[in-house]
Amino acid sequence: MSSKYPVSVRTCLPLCALVVETAFILIFFFFTTYDVVSEKQQLMDKYQVFQDVTVMAALGLGFLASSFPKHSWSSIAFDLFILAVGVQWAVLLNGFLKDDYNGEIVIELSSIQVATMSAMSVLISASAVLGKTNLVQLMMMALVEVTAFSVVYMTSKKVFSLEECTSMMYIHVFAAYFGLAVTWCLSMSTPSKEQMEERLAKSSSLFAMLGTLFLWIFWPRFNSTLLYSPDERKNAVFNTYYALAVSTVTAISVSASAHPQGKINMAHIHNAVLAGGVAMGASCHLISSPWPAMVLGLLAGLISIGGAKCLPGWARPVGLMRFHRMLMVHYTFGLPGLLGEFAYIIVKVYQLSSTTNSLMCYKILFDIGVLSFVMVMSLATGFLTGSLLRLKIWKAPDRNKYYHDQTFWKFPHLAAGF
Amino acid sequence: MSSKYPVSVRTCLPLCALVVETAFILIFFFFTTYDVVSEKQQLMDKYQVFQDVTVMAALGLGFLASSFPKHSWSSIAFDLFILAVGVQWAVLLNGFLKDDYNGEIVIELSSIQVATMSAMSVLISASAVLGKTNLVQLMMMALVEVTAFSVVYMTSKKVFSLEECTSMMYIHVFAAYFGLAVTWCLSMSTPSKEQMEERLAKSSSLFAMLGTLFLWIFWPRFNSTLLYSPDERKNAVFNTYYALAVSTVTAISVSASAHPQGKINMAHIHNAVLAGGVAMGASCHLISSPWPAMVLGLLAGLISIGGAKCLPGWARPVGLMRFHRMLMVHYTFGLPGLLGEFAYIIVKVYQLSSTTNSLMCYKILFDIGVLSFVMVMSLATGFLTGSLLRLKIWKAPDRNKYYHDQTFWKFPHLAAGF
Amino acid sequence: MSSKYPVSVRTCLPLCALVVETAFILIFFFFTTYDVVSEKQQLMDKYQVFQDVTVMAALGLGFLASSFPKHSWSSIAFDLFILAVGVQWAVLLNGFLKDDYNGEIVIELSSIQVATMSAMSVLISASAVLGKTNLVQLMMMALVEVTAFSVVYMTSKKVFSLEECTSMMYIHVFAAYFGLAVTWCLSMSTPSKEQMEERLAKSSSLFAMLGTLFLWIFWPRFNSTLLYSPDERKNAVFNTYYALAVSTVTAISVSASAHPQGKINMAHIHNAVLAGGVAMGASCHLISSPWPAMVLGLLAGLISIGGAKCLPGWARPVGLMRFHRMLMVHYTFGLPGLLGEFAYIIVKVYQLSSTTNSLMCYKILFDIGVLSFVMVMSLATGFLTGSLLRLKIWKAPDRNKYYHDQTFWKFPHLAAGF
């Protein structure tokens, strides 16, 4: 029975959503005002950057997550829902956590943009969880994860005095391991291998490729957007572009060598071509010639394909299918993100090479400490969120209905009226 | 027989199109010159805005209309055709109707942009009519509707002295009710319910979602583009963004509550998530804090889903399928557009609350008068156009062939050669 | 056997790609540095233009090439691969061939942009060759063609003293005839007509339409990007837009008249609507009123559809299917490109009409000479490349496997694990 009639979220979802939305409206009513803008050119430029970031979040990550053919409707529409909830909450949180908060949040265009970037952490994590959760669970996850990431972001900015850009770039590592931790909690059992394979069948459509291309094209914008010196911004754009170009060439060619008949795996391509951009995130403004970016792109491509090929090996005994989406997140954002953080530490050390050894050691330990803090925060909040989402009250979809649009969507041919 | 061999527009279409095109070229030859531009930065900024508006028209509205799987080729290609015809005609009309017209139209980048926005009225109306009309009919409709809308736009700008932005925002109401009136005239009979359901079958593909996302992302640009004070423009961007975010959350969650098993209707999502942007159009520059925009977004989402659910009820006796596309236009652009106009009147009244009662009454009556003028114009010209399009000379597609690409397109597997 | 187990590029592809990539990194290491940027506004504007050109290359041309349903994965992914390789090589080549080269290449944002435009020549040619070649062959072709086009581009800029924009616009003619020459060499035999027709079957999907629309929307940017006077740039934007609008109307309506039942051919639409933009390329900055652009758009639409209809007639005896993709390239870029070059000569002559006859004759002969040089270079290098690609060492796909994704891609349902 339960496999035929999935648990309905008919009352639960609208109730939760409208309560959250009403709460948001009330908080906005009491605590926020708009910035006053007088300079038109600046507004135009900022708006352009903001719009490009929104394209990445809604189109890029939305379509990237659509590679399951029977679950593509949910992936894209739920991503838009998460984005809309996440941005509102992130604007409020970033306002409350600001140094100069005095009872009123002044909303600027840049604060919506930073909020969109924070909400992208949920979109990245969600791509590991989509198909196993309903919208109520995803909304809860969005609220918790935006909170956790905003705390991490503000801590590394204010407590550890890191630059805005460096603090933001922990997003990849944070989101990937948060997502992994949540999935770990959720997926104690899955549909049978046969059922899953049928659902993976045609997989990885051209829509996912569309999402990939949008991300590929706009990634230099993403990495450069929180930098304010023209020269750093230029470095970020150039390095990200070169890293992406090299990781594309590497990923596609190495994917062929990983298959016995030399065939390319589309799922690799969707994700690994982006590895260069992720790996470049943390150090993109510090490098001022193309070759280190290209080397990093090469390594990111290798690590990403390597991760995709090797992990299934030791993961198989634990349950093959359970890891499928986790892995995609891990090798797209997790591993290249870690590589990027290590590259950041190496570049920093190189820049300090003229100073004393003790200072350098301190710097290395400090950076490793911050990275560990991010990892611990992401895994801890991830497991907490995962445990929270396993509660019965959320009416999670039945495990036989994982990765199936039919659980959530009215299909015309099944409908009595329309 | 007639169902097998649809009426050919082989000679009719190229003849009409080439005559119209030649007429355009002659009018452009005798009456137009290009503007002289000397400031590069300004050109770059204006070009960017113009390009974004074109993305909304060609990609956004084009793909939004593609939700019928057997009619998606026609929807997208015909929309591009209408856009190309409509923009040329709108540039000429807006030039002729200008105050300072002295026998020569100076074409600026902004005039092509305003023309694109005027031509979008045809794209909106066409989404109610596509599938029941051939390209000749659509071209005629484009010419008539661009004329009618340009007259409305210029009247409200020059006779009623409204701002450029406010005049343009009547586009949603005008286009929706124009489209409804035309469809009413065209669709005295439709294919049988079975035939239609088969054609609706898989419906609402991911391409329509792509169109929706493009519109969602670029809507703040659309609402802000005719505002020239930086502060008003900033208000427009912020308010539109918040209204869209809230209407997305509302529409998706309320769509679930409207279904007995709590399932979400994809057709609702395609359209209702945009309701916030439409409703925000008229008053977006006047509101200077986020909460009224969010409330409006909430109401727009509710009204849009409510309209989609309730109207079929009383519409059923009249003929269910006949209304399908009309309804989409009505609840995406019609109802939220009306809500937006009422919000505009309320905001105006609120701003005048310090003045005398008689002035306020006059202002309310004046605004309602303008709205009525737009409604009357749109319905009247719509019915006229509809009656015109029913003439035999246009060789309309047979009613059994409604919503079917095969009527208009050569399919490779049916072709003798290629 | 050979039809079941296509030749594996398992070792060949990664080896070649990594060797090329390592060579690039070494050359970048020894010869390049980044530009120093101090002015933020300029960087923002240049970045925007660069990003739009990348959208055209990766999304536009990538999806335009995806019209074969069984070969769409390869088309898009291989295009991205070619782009990534081509841009890196073109940046280096353009640096080495510069006048002021003194042992160090300073990479600016504009040099990556020009490199992207040069690499687009490979994407255009590749659309004639895709489906008959593997990635190793395509990479070789990219390296050779970027070299040849950069030589042509630099020669016409430095030796013939043509403007940057005019030199770049030879790209359409060069790429089209290079691609034709390569295909001619490759396709001495093809799959049987039945096999091909089955592979063409559903053809020309909405994804190709998406690519077309991206190109259509961004084409004014492409044509105007290498112009530096605001007035010339404005002319380029306006003329390109009008030419595209008119060629769209013409192409769609004439396509209907070319079919016995008045049906429109989707493959025509994908390509012929762009003819106006291609034809406008060379002379877009010289024309300062809309009507000549519109006339050119009309002619381009007619020539493009005419070319698509007439060529198959005399081509049929030689082997119908062999020409299919060649023809698409020919009537999208080849014929309209030639038309554009002739229009350029006529406009130049018209501007010189006040001078002496002998100067005018010299000018005409000079321009025809440059065009002939481009044609000869493109055909010669094309045939050379084609002969090179026929060598056994590249392990070209078996002819029965032409236009089939299965040759190159791992499909989930065929996979043992995943």
Image (cartoon, coloured by chain):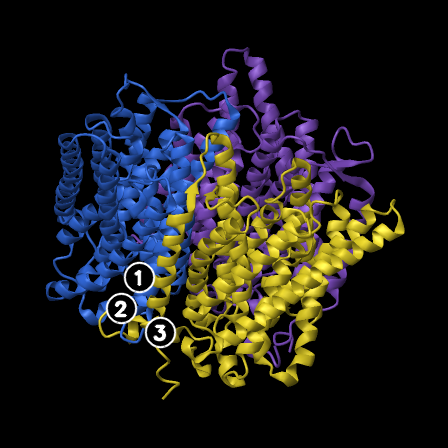
Chain colours: A purple, B yellow, C blue
The single residue placed furthest to the front in the displayed view is B102
Task: Kindly report which numbered mark, 1 or 3, lies closer to the viewer in this rendering.
Answer: 3
The residue where tag 3 is placed is B9
- Label pair 2/1, CB-CB below 8 angstroms: yes
Q: Nearer the viewer, residue C352 or A288?
A: C352
Residue at mark 2 to residue at mark 1: CA–CA distance: 11 Å
The secondary element bearing badge 1 is classed as helix
Task: Give the letter of the chain under mark 3.
Answer: B
In the rendered structure, which amino acid carries the disc numbered 2?
A: Ala
Label number found at residue A99 = none
The secondary element bearing badge 2 is classed as loop
User: Both on one chain, marks 3 and 2?
Assistant: no
User: Both on one chain, marks 2 and 1?
Assistant: yes
The residue where tag 1 is placed is C268
**In which quadrant will I find the C terminus of chain B?**
bottom left
The secondary element bearing badge 3 is classed as loop
Q: Give residue C104's quadrant in the image.
A: top left
Q: Give residue C28's quadrant in the image.
A: top left
User: Around disc 3, counting alpha carbons within 10 Å, would you say few (fewer than 14), some (14 to 19), or many (20 or more)?
Assistant: many
In the rendered structure, which amino acid carries the disc numbered 1?
A: His
Task: Give the letter of the chain under mark 1.
Answer: C
